[in-house]
Image (cartoon, helix red, strand yellow):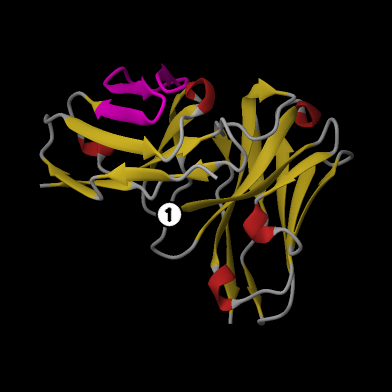
Amino acid sequence: EIVLTQSPGTLSLSPGERATLSCWASQSVSGSDLAWYQQKPGQAPRLLIYGASSRATGIPDRFIGSGSGTDFTLTISRLEAEDFAVYYCQQYGSSPLTFGGGTKVEIK
Amino acid sequence: QVHLLQSGAEVRRPGSSVKVSCKTSGGAFMNYGINWVRQAPGRGLEYMGGILPIFGSTDYAHHFQGRLTITADTSTGTVYLELSSLRSDDTAVYYCGSQTMVPAALRHFMDVWGTGTTVIVS
């Protein structure tokens, strides 16, 4: 199975700053079949990005997905108060589906 | 717009089974794969398996094979997860997630999620 490693584990930033989250795959992810989710405490995950770089419906353009193969990045261009949360990557190119361990973006 | 309504919290003894439901509304239930993902307290997301109701096909993560059964009742638009031989480390929130952007497929990203069902094994 493809193991996804996210870094850093925690990112401490201030509103208005840029956040760069990484997701590395143990093998190449087929067809850039990688998604990013946001999860807030007590809530279900929310789809942000699919196909490595396509934004889901209603997702602000400050969320930017990029990458291919084994290296993927989620960039939040300017953090807003509601962006402080945990972010997960997920690959769906190979069975079984797998998730990364998550990156927590917290207020500095 | 598809909505997923999950059943309420459950408490079970070790060695028993639990069955959690996920009822769909507002969409073409048969056409979209539905996956189950769980999250243990303070931990990340773990894929368990999924079903594509239109074909009745299922997918299970190896970790759960033999203990997990996912079924769909097409008459009510409800998907079920049944997990047997429960252990304390099965304590988690169980989420269903639908692939409404990718019809007739298994093992994809999930764009609509249920609110989660807490299962406590103690």
Give the SS element for disc 1: loop
Residue B71 picture location, percent across and down: 81, 49
The correct choice, above or below, for B122 with respect to B55 in the image is below
- Type of amino acid at the residue the image marks with label 1: Gly
The correct choice, above or below, for A41 with respect to B56 in the image is below
Q: Residue B12 appears in which quarter of the rendering?
A: bottom right
Residue B105 appears in the rendering? yes
User: Can you identify the residue that label 1 sits on?
Assistant: B44
Q: Is residue B97 magenta?
A: no
Question: Which residue sits at x=76%, y=46%?
Answer: B79
Residue reaching furthest to the right: B75
Q: Is residue B70 left or right of residue B88?
A: right
Chain hosting mark 1: B
Quarter holding the C terminus of chain B is bottom right
Residue B48 picture location, percent across and down: 63, 52
Residue reaching furthest to the front: A27
The correct choice, above or below, for B17 with respect to A70 in the image is below
Q: Is residue A65 magenta?
A: yes
Question: Which residue sits at x=11%, y=31%?
Answer: A17
Residue B68 picture location, percent across and down: 73, 59
The correct choice, above or below, for A74 with respect to B56 in the image is above
Q: Is residue A28 left or right of residue B78?
A: left
Question: Which residue sits at x=68%, y=56%?
Answer: B7
Give the magenta part as a residue range: A51-75
Residue A86 appears in the rendering? no
**Label 1 crowding class (10 Å Cα cut-off): few <14, some 14-19, many 20+?**
some
Question: Which residue sits at x=87%, y=38%?
Answer: B74
Q: Residue A96 appears in which quarter of the rendering?
A: top right
- Closest to the observer, A97 or B33: A97
Residue A16 picture location, percent across and down: 12, 29
